[in-house]
Image (spheres, grey):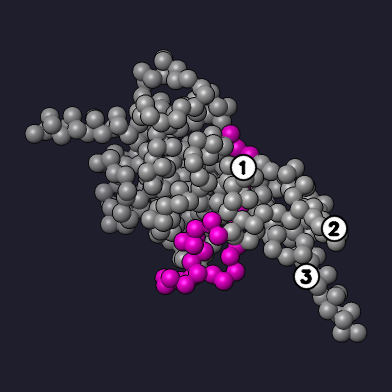
Amino acid sequence: MAAVASSFSRFSFRCAVCPSPLRVRFSQPHPPARLRVSSTVVALHKRNPKRLKYAAERQFTRGDAGLLRVEVEPSGGDFWKLDPIIDLINRGAVGVIPTDTVYSVVCDLSNNESIERLRRLKGIGDSKPLSILCRSLRDIDTYTTGFPQGTNQGQANIFRVVKRAIPGPYTFILPASKQFPKQCIKHGSSTRYAKRRQVGVRIPDDPICQAILQNLDEPLICTSVKYLSEDEWILDPVIIADLYEPLGLDFIVDGGPRIADPSTVVDMMGANPTVIRQGKGLKLDWMVAKDEEEDEAQSMFSFKSA
């Protein structure tokens, strides 16, 4: 009986880490020499039994092995290791990947169950908005109403200048389109949804993140990885795995430690593109700071009052 269990465990492990012949391949072929050393491809964290009482329901269990951790070099020479990650995302897994700023918890945009698991894992309520990691401007045009492209009445063509800033460390808040899942903008535990439909969109300038996105059929829902009791980003993937694995995290892509520099958030919902959080992305000349816009609005109010 023990021998059967051992065989089944080895079979499950091979199925988890070996790419399916039906899956889309990366352009980089698998180096034969590295295939013989599976420990360099995937590292598995063992679960701490003392933490099991805190664990959320896991969608992709591997017995006592724990979550799937894949170490990847940013140079791109070993992106073929991401094959099992692509497979897990398509099956509804919730995991962590690197971006050009900090690490993000991600899941499939069209999988409502995965979105709910992501919220439970992060401990965030239904009213907290979620952003999306996009593959291209086409995704932004699909799930939002897009960037203003200017009019004959003098409205600025924001789309032209935005194209120079992406891919990059910016999150742009835009009106959501009908294609954007309602599950991502729900208010409270009821079926009511936000009247003001808006969403943050990103196209990260990170080779690992781009390699994952370009091999998916849809963008990813995302939220940054923070300590559970503190409003502080976790920058080391080893610490992320240690803290989030007991909570039900399915996988993590280890791209090395990051710097505590989040994306710059630009609100495109008003008359001017307004920086509401200064981060890694520079404030460009066509953006205004939040306090600058407030001063301008106050000046206009004073003028009308006078």
Q: How far apart are the two marked residues, 3 and 1, measured between alpha carbons?
A: 32 Å
- Disc 1 residue type? Ser
Quadrant holding the N terminus? top left
N-terminal of the two: label 3 or label 1?
A: 1
Residue 247, image x, y percentages: 36, 53
For the residue marked with disc 3, what is the amino acid?
A: Glu
Q: CA distance from mark 2 to mark 1?
A: 27 Å
Name the mark nearer the viewer: 3 or 1.
1
Q: Which residue in the protein does label 3 denote? A: 294
Point out the residue furthest to the bottom here: 306
Count of numbered circles in the view? 3
How crowded pointer 2 is (Cα within 10 Å; few <14, some 14-19, many 20+) is rated as few
Q: Nearer the viewer, mark 2 or mark 1?
A: 2
| Label 3 neighbour load within 10 Å: few <14, some 14-19, many 20+ | few
* Above or below, comparing residue 98 to residue 7 in the picture: below
Q: Which residue is mark 2?
A: 152
- Give the side of residue 31 with respect to residue 100, left or right: left
Per the model, the C-alpha gap separating discs 2 and 3 is 27 Å
Residue positioned most to the front? 152
**Mark 2: secondary structure:** loop
Q: Is residue 11 left or right of residue 177?
A: left
- The residue shown at (82%, 75%) is 298
Local SS, label 3: helix
Helix, strand or loop under label 1: loop
Residue 190 position (above or below residue 15): below
The answer to whether marks 2 and 1 mark residues whose Cβ atoms lie closer than 8 Å is no
Q: Which is more toward the observer, 62 or 51?
A: 62
Give how far across and how far down residue 132 sits, in percent. Answer: 55, 51
Q: Which residue is mark 1?
A: 136
Find the magenta span and give its range.
178-207
